[in-house]
Image (tube, helix red, strand yellow):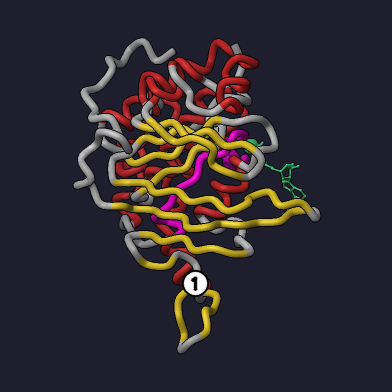
Amino acid sequence: PAQTTTPRERTPTRAGRPMSAPVVLEARDLRKALGGREVLAGVDLEIRRGDVCVIIGPSGSGKSTLLRCLNRLLIADQGTILLDDQPFGYRPSGSAIRPEPERHLAERRRRVGMVFQRFELFPHYTALENVVLAPRHFGLVPRAGAREYGLALLRRVGLEQHADKYPHQLSGGQQQRVAIARTLAVEPEVILLDEPTSALDPELVNEVLSVIASLADEGMTMVIVSHEMDFARLVADRVVFMDAGRIIEDGAPDQIFSAPAHQRTQRFLAAIG
Ligand code: ADP
Ligand code: MG
């Protein structure tokens, strides 16, 4: 996959990466129960500026729940999420910790973008309208400049010529690329991608992975849940293995794929072949 991009010169993370890049997004001891089960059982994760972190793990291990808590689509039962060292979603009020006002939440959510497995485009808006809706809402672009702004974003994902089509007129791969452009449109600091290619027909996977790889090359900070192991090897600075609501292992791709330290990681990698 993503053969159009060359492997980048990236310093290995965790073990070898200089700790100079600031932490952008950090989870501390995140816990979340759903349906009476502990889905996140104490997750600690640090994402540094420019990191490309790929999360792998068995179905049901809590990967989607973690991403949803990171941008507060879901509220964790316990733990802290820091965005640029500020508590994300809560702020201290006297001695108590109170939920953040909705307008602050919207602004913070803008800074942590999300790309979903099933694209989630607005069906009754064109590709261009899907892309410019949020930046218009946030006042990032004047009405007069909106079309140019949207076209430039669609150009980045190779879809400028499809700007005026509706989602149903686009392939799944094209829809996902529009969804990525839409996420970029509000200038997030971090993008979370939850299995961005797993709803696609196999022949459409590479066009989406190539777009993600080009964002990685541009230095975009990303957390990607993916089962595309070749892709993870190519673009990830870090691979995180989750199982049963916990991070079991967190390291450079070569280390995780070639010499996993934990039996559960070994078993998972063997099972997916
Ligand atoms: P993953 O993305 O790793 O496959 P998820 O985070 O989606 O895992 O889910 C982890 C576990 O939480 C699964 O067992 C799932 O069934 C359960 N779960 C997720 N959402 C809900 C919900 N809204 N209510 C009850 N259980 C849920
Ligand atoms: Mg999931």
Is 158 left, or right, of 193 in this rendering? Answer: left
Residue 248 drawn at (x, y percent): 54, 37
Q: Is mark 1 within 8 Å of ligand 1?
A: no
Is residue 207 visible in the rendered image? The answer is no
Q: Number of numbered discs present?
A: 1
Tag 1: amino acid: Tyr
Q: Quadrant of residue 200?
A: top right
At horizontal 63% and vertical 64% (from top left) the residue drawn is 77
* 39 falls in the magenta region: no
Residue 239 drawn at (x, y percent): 44, 31
Image quarter of the C terminus: top right
* 124 falls in the magenta region: yes
Which of 69 and 38 lies nearest the eye of the viewer?
38
Specify the segment rendered in magenta: 109-127
Relative to 107, residue 270 above or below = above
Residue 246 drawn at (x, y percent): 59, 44
Image quarter of the N terminus: top left
Is 164 left, or right, of 73 in this rendering? Answer: left
At horizontal 45% and vertical 80% (from top left) the residue drawn is 92
Which of 2 and 13 lies nearest the eye of the viewer?
13
Relative to 151, residue 234 above or below = above
At horizontal 63% and vertical 43% (from top left) the residue drawn is 62
Residue linked to disc 1: 90
> Splitting the image into four quadrants, where does ligand 1 fall?
top right
Looking at the rendered structure, the secondary structure element under dot 1 is strand
At horizontal 61% and vertical 22% (from top left) the residue drawn is 268
